[in-house]
Image (tube, rainbow, N blue to C red):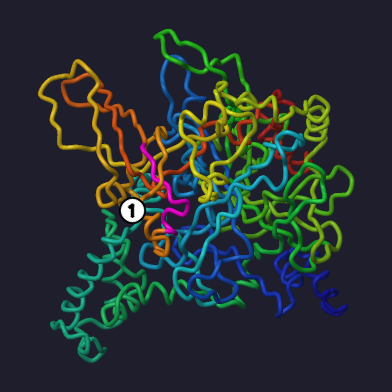
Amino acid sequence: TPPSSSMMVTVWCVFVLSCSTVIYASAIEDESNPCQLYLAQSTIPNAGLGVFAGTSFDYGQMIGRVGDAAFPVVDQDWHNSPDSGSQSKYEADYHWPLTNYDWNAPDIGMENEAEDVSVTVNGFGAAPNCHFRLLNVEEHKATYDTAGLDRYTSPGAGASTPWFNRTSTAAQDIEAGSELFVDYGPNWFLTRDGVFQLVPISESFEKAQAFLKEYGKLLVGSDNPDDLIEDKMSLDDEAQRDLWDVIKTFPYPTRERQALPDDHKDAIRAIHGDIQAIEKENSIRSTEYLKENGKCVDNIVPGKSSIPHAGRGAFATRFIPKGGLVAPAPLVHITHKSAVNMHNETIGHRGNIVRDENAIVKKQIIVNYMFGHPNSSLLLFPYSSNVPYINHHSTEYNTELRWATDFSFFHHEDWLNKTVEDLEEQWTSGLMLEFIALRDIQPGEEVLINYGDEWQQAWEEHVKKWEQIPVERDYNNLTLWTDTANRSAGYVRAEVYNKDTETPIRTTEEQITDPYSHSVQIQCQVNVNHDSAYLFEPETIPSFTREWNQERDDSEDVDEKHINNCKISERYEDDEDSEDEENEDDDEANEHNYLYTVELEVHKQFDGFDPIIERHEITDVPRDAISFVNMHYTSDVFLKQSFRHEMKLPDKIFPKAWMNLIPEEDRK
């Protein structure tokens, strides 16, 4: 509900003094609809932003109102590598600070998008910190969902990411005010010591706890924690503080020392208990603190947009008054737009396939979610929750952008006066925009901004040129880097076939007249390892035949799954199931009572030999050991006709210092 008139007077007075946090607080004065998530200063020293729970969450409960969007970035190093040699974003060969926010494709469910896929996820995929002793959030895979944008009928198909609803759930009961921590994996820190110093990993805390026990002995001459009282300590409080400062500031840092508590009194408490208990206590802020010093990130939520061909949009979850905060938008900056270019292929001077530098055929889909300016090479990616869903309207927009006026611990205002060349030296985020309501926005109303005249013109030209292609003409020819296949027309996701466990899988012979969609491949869970040893390179292709064996072929360990492309050579009834139809477990495992013979061709490499091809024939393979997977480069992300264009950051807030595509004298 709207605030009272007296409250509005107070808010307006504070607005004149530029205290936007009070305005924002007035937008959520509804106890029945509290803010669930806040951005605020992390409880980890020098970690910048943190994400905090505005309410409590039970174990297993989804955190926030909906999952986050995910953006595949495909073959990027290849597209940024000249014929003369390869480039790597992970080696800083070109500027792409989003490497600090990359997720492995299998973790998001995108391993089959392309040959080389890294994934950027906004919201919980980017904003939370990692603390290995306080991990309280479990993250899940995204869902492929185009929001009704059909590749055959909508010019908006492929313009927005189809990867949606990457959810996060509570890994334990979470108290309101707790900072939320996700698992980056230790390798993330081990490869970034130069950027983030020596961040403690799990083993660091074990060694730090052992050090504290020795420290306790030093203070009292005993390893009994009950002796750690002031009367028995050999050092007074001031001396303890000085000694602890020496320990913590010793000029040669280690991960173990970084894991020790910062305060000398917390060190004593950690000896009594453990570091984790102290860290957890220190990682909780009061909800009053968050309301006064944080920024709510769940004022908007995705839903079906009212804008034609836009797919999803962002909708207000509560009343937001004019001048109120719609959403904060911390930014990752990319200094060269060319980093998102995607090139056609050509043959290089060494006979290998390289990018054709003169043939830019597309841009990475993530560019549609970035802000830029025609006079600058800079791109800005906002990574706050649900911000990617804010759509465009050239006249009826109700929200605008401005630079944050607070959060000085994160937002570096001096960067607005730096050149693009200076910003290229920065590999961490340090800028923040805010989406601000231009008028009162009612609950359930769609939030809209103006992407700029350049974007509007580009969209109108795209719609005018876009050609509707009937399903009958789609033989794997609508997407980039795919060839015509001897399969049926039309795009069908593997998930559709995998849900249908009743229909028998067609054999290779049956597929000649009744093929599956060109966009899928059949795979089998078969262990192709064997005990045969090659004493010499075989002159003919080795062949192996055996029955499928659950113990050998069906590993429960995800990392040990034996998945290989296969062909279905034969289908026959399962005699055991036919004789015992009352066996429910068998019916569930193999619902249509068929077994299969499958054929696999496997390439192997042995020391001293050229690559060897093996053929395997496996009989009695159950249905649940056979699955469909999506072929590379067939999703809507790769549609040849899909729209690509960055949003324009308005002239009035785009810094002149960043306009490196115009003469220097015109930037002043």
Q: Is residue 421 visible?
A: no
Amino acid type of the residue tagged 1 in the rendering: Leu
Residue 44 higher or lower than 508, as above or below:
below
Q: Is residue 143 visible?
A: yes
Residue closest to the eye, 628 or 445: 628
* Quadrant of the rendered image containing residue 565: top left
Which residue in the structure is indicated by mark 1? 198
* Quadrant of the rendered image containing residue 568: top left
Residue 668 higher or lower than 323, as above or below:
above
Q: Farthest residue toward the bottom? A: 231
Q: Position of residue 105 (x, y in %)?
A: 46, 43
Which residue is at a point 62% across and 25% down the rendered structure image?
475
Q: Position of residue 324 (x, y in %)?
A: 77, 63
Which residue is at a point 62% across and 23% down the rendered structure image?
477
Write the start and end of the magenta stretch as one range.
587-597
Q: Position of residue 153 (x, y in %)?
A: 77, 35
Secondary structure of residue under mark 1: loop
| Residue 524 falls inside the magenta stretch | no
Residue 165 higher or lower than 469, as above or below:
below
Residue closest to the eye, 301 or 514: 514
Quadrant, the N terminus: bottom right
Quadrant, the C terminus: top right
